[in-house]
Amino acid sequence: MKKILSLTAFVFSMSFYFSQELNPPSKEISIQNKEQVFVNDVPMIKYEVLEKKIQEKKDVLLVLNFWSTTCAPCVKELPDFMEVNNKYKDNPKFKMLLVSLDRPKDKERVVQFIKNKKLSAEVILLDDIKRMNTWIPRFEKNWDGNIPVTIVYKNSEKVHFNDGEMTKTELENVITKNL
C-alpha cells in the first residue's frame, strides 16, 4: 500500500512539475500603485489611467470603443472596427483603443478572445466596474452605461459620441470628417 501511495505521489509531483514547464505562468506584471497591471501584454487599468491616456493623445484622432466579450452587438461590430483600424493604423494621427469592460477575473478569456478574433487595435481592460457611476458621466453625461459605446477624441477633445452599435460606414465617416 505504501508503494502505491508513494508512486501516486511521485506521478502527481512529476505531472505538476511538467505542466508548469509546458504552461509557463501568464506574463503578469503588477505596478506598485495598482493603477495598471499587464496580463499577456493587455493592461488592466483604472479610470484615471485611461483619462491620462486620452489627455496624452495630442495631435491624434483617438477612437475609443467600450465593449465586452459577452456583448453580442459589441462582438458583431468588432470585425468592422478592425477593418477600419487596419486601414488607418499606419497614420500617425490615428489611434484606436478598445476598452474591455469584462470582469477582471475573466481576463484570460479576454486575452483568448483577442487572439481568436485577431484584434489588431490596442486593447485594455478597465478594472473599475465598482465606480461605473463615477466615470461613465465623465465620458458622456448622456451615456446610460450600455455598450457598445464609441467615443472619438481629436486633440484630446471629444468630437463624437455613439451609443450603441456602429457600422463601418458610420465609423469611417466620423474618422474622415475629423482626421
Image (cartoon, helix red, strand yellow):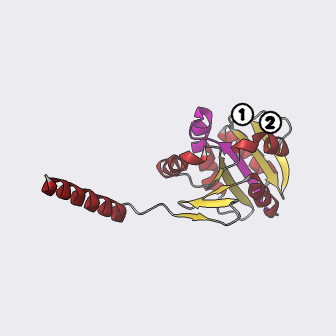
* Element at label 1: loop
> In this orientation, which residue lies closer to the viewer: 23 or 80?
23
Q: Is residue 8 above or below residue 71?
A: below
Q: Which residue is mark 1?
A: 146
Residue 178 locus on image (x, y percent): 81, 52
Which quadrant of the structure image shows residue 86? bottom right
Q: Which residues are magenta?
A: 57-79
| Residue plotted at (69% across, 46% down) | 65
| Residue plotted at (71% across, 47% down) | 128
Which quadrant of the structure image shows residue 138? top right
Residue 48 locus on image (x, y percent): 78, 56
Three-letter amino acid code at the position of disc 2: Trp
Could you tell me if the residues under marks 2 and 1 are in contact, i.e. CB atoms within 8 Å?
yes
Q: Is residue 85 left or right of residue 117?
A: right
Q: Is residue 5 left or right of residue 15?
A: left
> In this orientation, which residue lies closer to the viewer: 97 or 51?
51
Residue 136 locus on image (x, y percent): 79, 42
Q: Inspect the magenta stretch and tell me whether residue 71 lies in it.
A: yes
Query: Alpha-carbon distance for marks 2 and 1?
Result: 7 Å
Looking at the rendered image, the quarter that the C terminus falls into is bottom right
Q: Which residue is mark 2?
A: 143
Three-letter amino acid code at the position of disc 1: Asn
> In this orientation, which residue lies closer to the viewer: 100 or 78?
100
Q: Point out which mark residue 98 bears.
A: none
* Element at label 2: loop
> In this orientation, which residue lies closer to the viewer: 10 or 114?
10
| Residue plotted at (67% across, 37% down) | 167
